[in-house]
Image: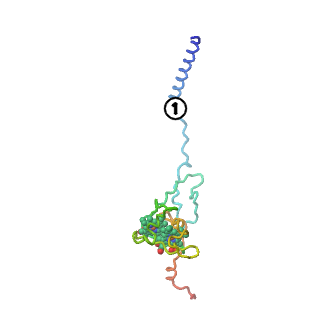
Amino acid sequence: MRNKPLLVAAGLTLVLSVLVFAAGWMFGSLRPRPVPPPTAASVPVDARAIFIPGGSEIDPLRRGVPVDKEGHPPPMARVENTDISRVRNYPMQPPTIPHTIDGYQVDLNSNRCMLCHARANAATFQAPPVSVTHYMDRDDQFLATISPRRYFCNQCHVVQTDAPTLVANGFKDIDTVMALPAPPGGH
Ligand code: HEC
Ligand code: HEC
């Protein structure tokens, strides 16, 4: 061996550097790191109270939380599965769906909704059949099966959730209007 002293020196250097590394690893982490003091800005602000029916302002982005504060995300609305239909909010509103529709597939090959809501199956499943409008094409001709215009049910019908009302609605249906006393001087 010609370079024996060199090899020994290299080996010693390696062992030494490993020792130094190990010592730094063990003791360096014991030193307490400076922790930033908690500031008021990082305390989440409860923004749920912002959804007040009839409130004067809607702020969907910050929900009234000041820009230097962090707000809780509002809880996700739950889909109701109560079988209780809601009254309509405007004329010709597609009725809302009083049951959950999780996993009900509607695509080119199958339409889960029509399993229950087709005329032929409605009695079996005790579901209201889709109305005649759902069989009409755009020229008001009646088709034998669901019209392509009404095929994708979720385009118009939505589930009912327990989300709070954001905007007040003064809509009165025709039955309510007819029950009102006649305006003075009117016909
Ligand atoms: C397993 C059978 C079944 C399936 C599948 C189904 N429904 Fe229903 N649906 C019903 C029944 C039964 C009712 C009557 C109210 C109740 O019992 O929930 C109803 C009520 C409705 C109503 C209310 C009608 C009204 O006059 O108020 C709508 C709208 C509706 N469903 C749409 C849909 C849509 C859209 C789908 C597919 C995403 C669907 N349904 C899938 C059984 C079903
Ligand atoms: C283009 C919008 C649209 C689409 C798509 C649509 N509907 Fe409707 N649906 C309506 C409207 C509007 C009404 C209420 C007036 C009417 O009957 O036409 C209604 C009424 C209904 C009703 C109540 C019927 C009754 O006699 O009270 C059911 C049930 C229903 N739809 C189910 C479905 C199903 C299931 C699908 C998918 C196969 C579907 N709808 C697709 C708009 C739509």
Counting from the top left corner in percent of width and height, residue 63 is at 56, 58
Foreground residue among 76 and 167? 76
Q: Quadrant of the N terminus?
A: top right
Question: What's under tag 1, amino acid-wise?
Answer: Ser
Q: Residue at x 48, y 72 (%)?
A: 130
- As drawn, is 4 to the left or to the right of 127? right
Camera sees residue 124: yes
- As drawn, is 101 to the left or to the right of 67? left
**Can you tell me which quadrant of the image ligand 1 is in?**
bottom left
Q: Residue at x 54, y 44 (%)?
A: 38
Q: Say if 151 sits above or below 47 in the image.
A: below
- Name the colouring of the figure: rainbow
Crowding around mark 1 (Cα neighbors within 10 Å: few <14, some 14 to 19, many 20+) is: few
Q: Residue furthest front?
A: 144
Q: Say if 11 sits above or below 73 in the image.
A: above
Q: Residue furthest top?
A: 2
Q: Residue at x 52, y 29 (%)?
A: 25
Q: Residue at x 49, y 58 (%)?
A: 76
Foreground residue among 86 and 171? 86
Counting from the top left corner in percent of width and height, residue 23 is at 52, 25
Q: Residue furthest right?
A: 67
Q: Which residue has dot 1 on it?
A: 29
Q: Say if 155 sits above or below 140 in the image.
A: above
